[in-house]
Amino acid sequence: MKNNTKYTIKRTIIALPLATTLLIAGCATTAQSPEKASANKVTTTQGTQQYVAQPAAHLIALLPMRDGYGANDHDAYEAKLRPITKEHGMTLDSVYTVSKYLGGNGPSKASSLGIWSLGTDKSLGEVMGDPHYQAQTKYRDTIHDMANSPMYIVKEEFKGASLPSSHALLVGVLVMNQGYDFKAHDAYEKAIAPVTARYGMRIYRSYRVLQKMGAHNSDNVVAVNLWELPNTEALGKIMNDPDYVANIPNRDKIHNMKATTMYFATPRSVGQ
């Protein structure tokens, strides 16, 4: 069956380099006492969701903007938050502009991807409970479509070298089929690592999902990965390489390709 669309989700679960010992099996959240869990409830426009504190974790947020608002509005909002988050040990690591939705069950209109470091297992809960943060939630909900914003508490598993400004970035929210974990994924990646290396693709960041919050979340989301490509055209070349195509049946057996979401994105300076 030929692929007539240059970028389809059925061609976009891309292998990481062979050195993916960073790949992980399992993503259960940590149990807490009712008293501690109660202190870490996160309130959104969707209601109250329980945030389970995780040590040395990060927060990843995929945020669609409402009509009439863009990256400058988002960054101005986050600039207001930084003194609040800093007080509680939460810092913005990086922010990316989502330039193209490639498929999956994630938000098709996501426009910003933000990655925050949580200094302690109390940081996020303390920020959410801070009255100065709560004073900003009305504006947050005015400019962001919070009802369609998936968020993930994650553990950073791999951090590669800096991204050249001329290179492309592929973001993947990876979902496995039931009964499969990253042992199967790792075997798949080893099989196609020579193909991705052929086109200059490498892992840039890899985050293991500890907890899901918000919308558009499949039960078996296991990782959020960022890959570097020399250009966006390289993805199409990988997907149509005969050696890659030969591995598609195995790829589709272990990955939930319908749910796995992919985007092209570009980094932007924090505060701009």
Image (cartoon, rainbow, N blue to C red):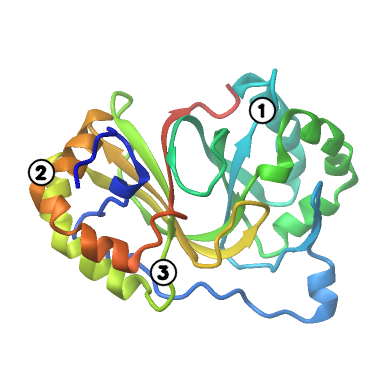
Three-letter code for the amino acid on which mark 2 is drawn: Arg
* Residue labelled with disc 1: 74
* Residue labelled with disc 2: 198
Separation of marks 3 and 2 at Cα, in angstroms? 28 Å
Three-letter code for the amino acid on which mark 1 is drawn: His
> Going by the image, does 220 lie left or right of 248?
right
Seen at 15% across and 51% down, the residue is 244
Separation of marks 2 and 1 at Cα, in angstroms? 37 Å
Seen at 17% across and 64% down, the residue is 190
* Residue labelled with disc 3: 177
Picture quarter with the C terminus: top right
Looking at this view, is 36 or 250 the one in front?
A: 250
Three-letter code for the amino acid on which mark 3 is drawn: Asn
The answer to whether marks 3 and 2 mark residues whose Cβ atoms lie closer than 8 Å is: no
> Going by the image, does 129 lie left or right of 154?
right
Q: Nearer the viewer, mark 3 or mark 1?
A: 3
Q: Which mark is residue 169?
A: none
Which badge, 3 or 1, is on the more N-terminal residue?
1
Residue 170 in view of the camera: yes
Residue 199 placement (x, y as % from top left): 14, 39
Seen at 57% across and 33% down, the residue is 109
Q: Nearer the viewer, mark 3 or mark 2?
A: 3
